[in-house]
Image (cartoon, grey):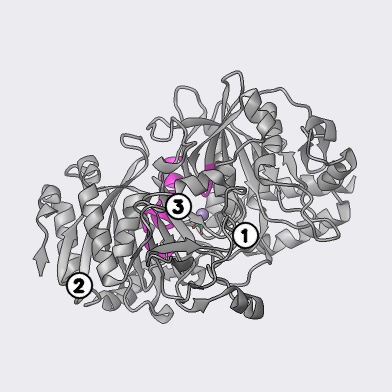
Amino acid sequence: MTTATNAAVAAANTYVQQWVKEQAEICKPDKIVWLNGSQQERDALFEQGCRDGVFVKLNQQKWPGCYYHRSNSNDVARTEHLTFICTPTADGAGPTNNWMSDKDAYAKLKPMYEGSMKGRTMYVIPFIMGPLGSPLAKVGVQLSDSLYVAVSMGIMTRMGDVAWKQLGDGNEFTRCLHSVLDCNPDRRFICHFPQDNTIWSIGSGYGGNALLGKKCLALRIASYLGQQQSWMAEHMLLMCAQAPSGEKTYVAAAFPSACGKTNFAMLIPPEKYQKAGWKITTLGDDIVWMWVDQKSGKLHAINPEAGYFGVVPGTNTRSNPNAIKAMSKNSIFTNVGLVTLPDGSYDVWWEDCDEEPPAKCIDWQGKEWTPEIARKTGAKAAHPNSRFTAPMANNPVLDASANDPAGVPVSAIIFGGRRSKTVPLVFQAFNWMHGVYLGATLGSETTAAATGQVGVVRRDPMAMLPFIGYNVNEYLAHWFRMRRTMKDCPRIFHVNWFRKNDQGKFMWPGFGDNMRVLKWIIDRCQGRAYAVETPIGWMPRAQDLDLDGLGLSPADVEAIQSVNVQEYMSELLSQEELLLKLAGELPKEIVFQRELLVSRLAL
Ligand code: OXD
Ligand code: MN
């Protein structure tokens, strides 16, 4: 076994050295490479990846610094049924997580790791989640035999020697062990040990299962730590809306996976807003960590990530020009179509991009794809959950505070789902407690971001169902309890961009025009906008929303905002599917809020 010399950088930390040695003795890699995060190292890894067939270098004029990767076709989304919270008792994981006892999980997975890296390289990947120096920033060290993971972690986190510096000689780092093994779903497990600050992932190279800083650390482990230490880790985007006056309003929004968080976080306001001086800037598109700032008593937030791992199909210069710019250099495309250009170099293509379909390409399964094949069989060139991995620094509208360790004060929290029926475009919770109820009962139609059926409504509390690293009842109680720690809490809203009419057409244009809804939300937070009290919350009237130039009549807006009492009663009944699962330990505030809603609807 050889060890690359930059291991010396980490040598100072005896805890790291000891742990890496122990894991190497189990996994038995041929080689251990300690990553330092430099550009030189990165270039060498990509070169190596091209030689090994892990990456294809794209045409560098069109895509500078960009590479193509195709994962195993059985490994293209998160596998929630193979994801476990491993605690001494089942109660630690709660009724919505898969549970394995920590002892059993270690005993089951350890033999799988035995010799799993024989003939392979173990990359030691030190990383920080959160801006340097932030009170919440966390150090992790991932050991992985995947070169794809190694370079992707370099995009998604602050990776390299900075992490050793932040860690110093301490022992407080998340121990992340990852091996792709033979990528067999029968031997795939994503196990979290919150009490040990440890993650063991095996049998998958898919981002959500394998980039352990993201869902595993920044959501599952971090949500557990947050509950212990009075802060919050949430599945939310974070953005700033700057008004023509210069006033800044920071907004966090939780939508389930593949429901448009990246698009909303990078929203381009309609032209008239831009002309008037409105600006939207992005802090994050997937995860926030929030704590109560002691001076102001307000909720402050950071984005712990340093990159975007976004859904590609449907992304184009109309739907999200900023994402197109973000992925235009130093990015990785996974499971999209691969096109050979006349000069022999490579390009990428996906459904609903800016360009016409190529005459032929290689699809996400490595098979030939032509428009003709697509017409006959419905085959897609890009998997619906194909992804781009891009540095957030590429985002032309990156917020100036994105790297600020002090975070930004959050004025609004938005919950949203993908609902073709029943749920109006926008409404505001009566207060924090009601808002927590709205988040807790959030429903959304399932998407391709996780394996399983697509398009069925499932309850997804705070869009965190797959990411709560402990008991959901304690998680909800934590949300209610946080109210007491804030002097001035954010207002809470609910949105639904996806309501359809009887003809099956979307009733709201979405994308940049979501600015109009956002403007009402901001004005509510700043004490400027009117709303009427309805059974489900505060709602704008048609005249409170800016509809100018949209071609929607006040009647259209009434339809999109309508609350049908019968449909809402059914909605309430369908929430029971979740609430019954939680019964026994369900926070009483949920029951009270539900009762209040029933009484308002019944009046
Ligand atoms: C993601 C997800 O990749 O939520 O962000 O699945
Ligand atoms: Mn996500």
- Apparent side of residue 96 relative to residue 107 in the rendered image (left or right): right
Q: Residue at x 61, y 57 (%)?
A: 460
Examine the residues drawn in magenta and state their main secondary structure: helix
Amino acid type, residue under disc 2 in the picture: Ile
* Disc 3 residue: CB within 8 Å of ligand 2: no
Q: Residue at x 32, y 69 (%)?
A: 54
Amino acid type, residue under disc 1 in the picture: Gly
Nearest the viewer among 542 and 167 is 542
Q: Residue at x 38, y 57 (%)?
A: 194
Amino acid type, residue under disc 3 in the picture: Leu
The part of the image, by quadrant, that contains residue 175 is: bottom left
- Apparent side of residue 486 relative to residue 562 in the rendered image (left or right): left
Query: In the image, which is nearer the foreground, mark 2 or mark 1?
Result: 2
**Residue at mark 1:** 584
**Residue at mark 2:** 26
Q: In the image as oriented, which residue stretches furthest toward the front?
A: 342
Q: In the image as oriented, which residue stretches furthest toward the top?
A: 245
Query: In the image, which is nearer the foreground, mark 1 or mark 3?
Result: 3
Image: 468 above or below 284: below
Q: Are marks 1 and 3 in contact (CB under 8 Å)?
A: no
